[in-house]
Image: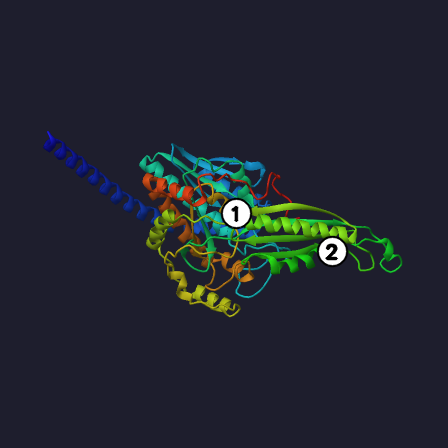
Amino acid sequence: MKNVLVILLVCLCTVLLGQSKKILKQLDADKSTTIQKLDSEFDRWASISREIWEFSEVGYQEYKSSKLLQDQLTKAGFEVSAGVADIPTAFIATWGSGETVMGILAEYDALPGLSQADVPMQQSIENKNAGHGCGHNLFGTASVAAGIAIKEWMQANNIDGQIRVYGTPAEEGGSGKVYMVREGLFDDVDAVLHWHPSSGNGVTSASSLANKTGKFRFYGKSAHAAGAPEQGRSALDAVEAMNFMANMMREHVPERTRIHYVITKGGDAPNVVPNFAEVYFYIRHPEMEEVRQIWDRLVKIAEGAALGTETRMEYEITGGVYNMMINETLAEVMQKNLERVGGYEYNEGELAFAKKIQETIDNKAPLTATSEIRPLESRTKGGGSTDVSDVSWTVPTVGLRAATYVPGTPSHSWQAVACTGMSIGQKGMMIAAKTMAITGMELFLSPEVLQKAMDELVKSRGEDFVYEAMIGEREPALDYRN
């Protein structure tokens, strides 16, 4: 009897192994087909990214950009829910049904003060203030392209599950995804894919800085600055006192803390004591709890500044995000697929463009970096902040960076805007689209990997973790750019 059971077990294992090999072989072929199809659609997606580049809409004002992406998804058969989480330009596009849910993040907001033409010298565009210095015109487009590619593969192969594209506004300081996480819109998702424009190709293995942002407003009393200065109480004095004390605090905060501010309103005329002034602060640190504590100290500084200048202070939290939770399980899968997709090389015109851009930047890197894939590195600490981080504490999340800028180009620069509006940025964009598409396809057929990724997340954040948004309970800061 034992021998019979052993034979049956061996036969069953052989059958399962054969089926597994067959599935993997089919998946391999499907990946090649998807890559080829996205290559054939280059002009379509390049045109859409260019339209969003021309719109250059800042956070929570991306009406045309959001609608353009929604229209593409609707035409592809997705069911689109617009205005989610009380944000007019946010949306969720869903296709399919079933227990497994895969999410893809799409961004599309521009940065103020970065108007720039798609030329390799600094040249602003008349009557335009903003520009895509972080390449979110490419980000949103590639994510939509990947979502549609996954949907078409699922439909052709009768794959059970849901593919969702999340339209996420105002990443640049507006914390759009935080409101969506707080609303519970990611609670049933098994994995989330994202990417970001960069000057090289690689899977994101670095964490990010948690941050909290807000505007401190001081109200004083106007008076003639020469004729009756004793009757005035300067709101600008309060802002300057706050900034002075905040700068003193820099000596007494943990390492890697970052404190930034700009005075957004300081008065209108030197001979009038300002009765209103405003300063906009960012606090960053690799750990979110440190950010919370430093922010509380900053509020005390503001209160002290108001007390000392006999003004009134109020503040508004405009944003706040966690630090990124890296998921090594998913990163290994995406790395393998990124290496399969590979990089790209410049044509003659792009090479000439890139060389001129390099003349204007300090950190010159080999132009061949666009054709290379960086190895997957161990966990490190990054220098920026992103609202993707809040998603990563809620659901296993993985992302990559693709070479959309001339190597060495810093983000948030006119050089980056120039690159994101032409073929250099668009070629990098398609690397991201193809990588996310075939990664999502593989994960739909890998329930054991999804479970391992979730186990890793739970272990990293702690089993007792409860999400509490850095922004508290405030409503979306839809006017934070005003």
Q: Secondary structure at mark 1?
A: loop
Q: Is residue 114 left or right of residue 444?
A: right
Instruction: Nearest to the eye among marks 2 and 1: give it.
Output: 1
Residue drawn 25% across and 44% down? 25
Residue identified by numbered label 1: 322
| Residue 222 or residue 94, whichever sits in front | 222
Provide residue 173's location: percent of width, then percent of height. Answer: 58, 50
Q: Quadrant of the N terminus?
A: top left
Provide residue 412's location: percent of width, then percent of height. Answer: 55, 58
Provide residue 195's location: percent of width, then percent of height. Answer: 45, 50
Residue identified by numbered label 2: 266
Is disc 2 surrounded by few (<14), some (14 to 19) or many (20+) residues within 10 Å? some
Q: State the image quarter where residue 149 is shown.
A: top left
Q: Amino acid at mark 2?
A: Gly
Residue drawn 57% across and 47% down? 320
Residue 374, placed above or below residue 326: below
Residue positioned most to the bottom: 359
> Mark 2 or mark 1: which comes first in sequence?
2
Residue 215, placed above or below residue 98: below
Residue 173, placed above or below residue 157: below
Q: Is residue 455 visible?
A: yes
